[in-house]
Image (tube, rainbow, N blue to C red):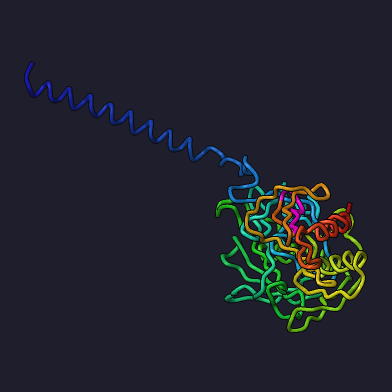
Amino acid sequence: MKTSTVLVIVVGVLLSFASVATAAGYLWSHDVHDRPAAAPTLPAIWPSKGGQALRAVPIPSGEMLTALPPDTGPHVLCQALSQQRWDALLGSRTLREVRDGACHAITATHEVTLRLAAAPAALEDPHTVDVAGLTGEAEYLAPEVNARLDVRLTSAAPTPQINPYLLVEVGRTSPAAPAATQAPDELAGSLATEIVRATMAPGLSLPTQNAAQTIAFRNQAPVPEHGIADSPWPVISWQLCTALLGKLGGTAKPRFDGRCTVRGVEAVYTDDVSPRVYPDTLAGRPAMITDKLVAVKLTDDSAQEVSFSGGSDGSDGKALRALAESVLPSLLAH
């Protein structure tokens, strides 16, 4: 067979394969494009990496929302509305968690972040919105995709214990996710309005504090089922003072930041304690007991702690331990 004839046959075969491959690729690409896009779904693992599961917390009233400890605020924002209300507002099943100091909520198509802050968001081109009678500001970050909102909840100046602003961010989980029935800024406004109504119902105002953070004493019963855990800073101080006064008498000196001193004994609340070993038990709770300090872990799922120091000069610390043990049932709402 002539060489030219062989070449013709080879070229013909190659062209046939190329035609078949092109046709297959064409059909495959059309099949892919013709298929409906997979429906968005919720994450299979929740809480997300770095997220924290919600724990039951009391919901404040009045201006006390702005005076919550850092670890408590996000839990309150996430739980101010029921699961059913979250689902209704966002249009589908909603998952919630605490992440990065904020309440983080997500549906198959949308994502929401809410946080309490000392300053407003840095909005570039905001428009005014009404938030439960308060004046807020909202803006689009990208048309029909996401938005931000901030609203000032109290005229009190920001301090380490007071965060006057509520910040809300709403966005789609991806640009291809279906839009919500409300525009992003309207959805942010709806969420903010309902959360403000749920957490700032008529109630206590923030107490005035002097330069030393001292506030006026108020007799404060334990918060049902919670005691001092996850309460606003002043409410914690009042509960501490009420409990100490009941055992020691005298005069109470409450401070805004979760402290109270009565007759030389100081009780202190914190939710930011360094990792600590609690080798002892007091009133059924893990504790660390020394001659000069009694520290008690308040909950199993947080770093909240109450400690007692001062008072008796006894070297064995028995008096301080006995006092702590006597007031803990009230502080734990037992």
Q: Position of residue 203 (x, y in %)?
A: 88, 70
Residue 48: horizontal and vertical position, in percent? 61, 47
- Which image quadrant for residue 272? bottom right
| Residue 307 against residue 302 in the figure, above or below | below
Q: Residue at x 82, y 64 (%)?
A: 199
Instruction: Give the image location of residue 318, x and y in percent.
Output: 81, 57
Task: Give whichever of 94, 334 is nearer the camera.
Answer: 334
Query: Foreground: 23 or 135?
Result: 135
Which range is magenta?
294-301
Can residue 214 be seen at all in this image of the molecule?
yes
Q: Is residue 30 left or right of residue 268?
A: left
Count of numbered tags: 0
- Determine if the magenta segment contains residue 296: yes
Single out the residue that lies furthest toward the left. 2
Q: Residue at x 56, y 65 (%)?
A: 142
Question: Is 240 drawn above or below residue 109 in the view shown?
Answer: below
- Work out whether residue 65 can be spotted: no
Residue 166 magenta-drawn?
no
Q: Residue at x 74, y 51 (%)?
A: 287
- Quadrant hosting residue 46: top right
Q: Nearer the viewer, residue 61 or 235?
A: 235
The outermost residue toward the bottom is 211
In the picture provided, is 112 more to the left or to the right than 228?
A: left
Q: Relative to the observer, which residue lies in front, 125 or 239?
A: 239
Q: Residue furthest front?
A: 315
- Lateral position of residue 265 relative to residue 129, left or right: right
Residue 289 x, y percent position in the rendering: 74, 54
Q: Is residue 6 left or right of residue 199?
A: left
Q: In which quadrant of the rendered image does the N terminus lie?
A: top left
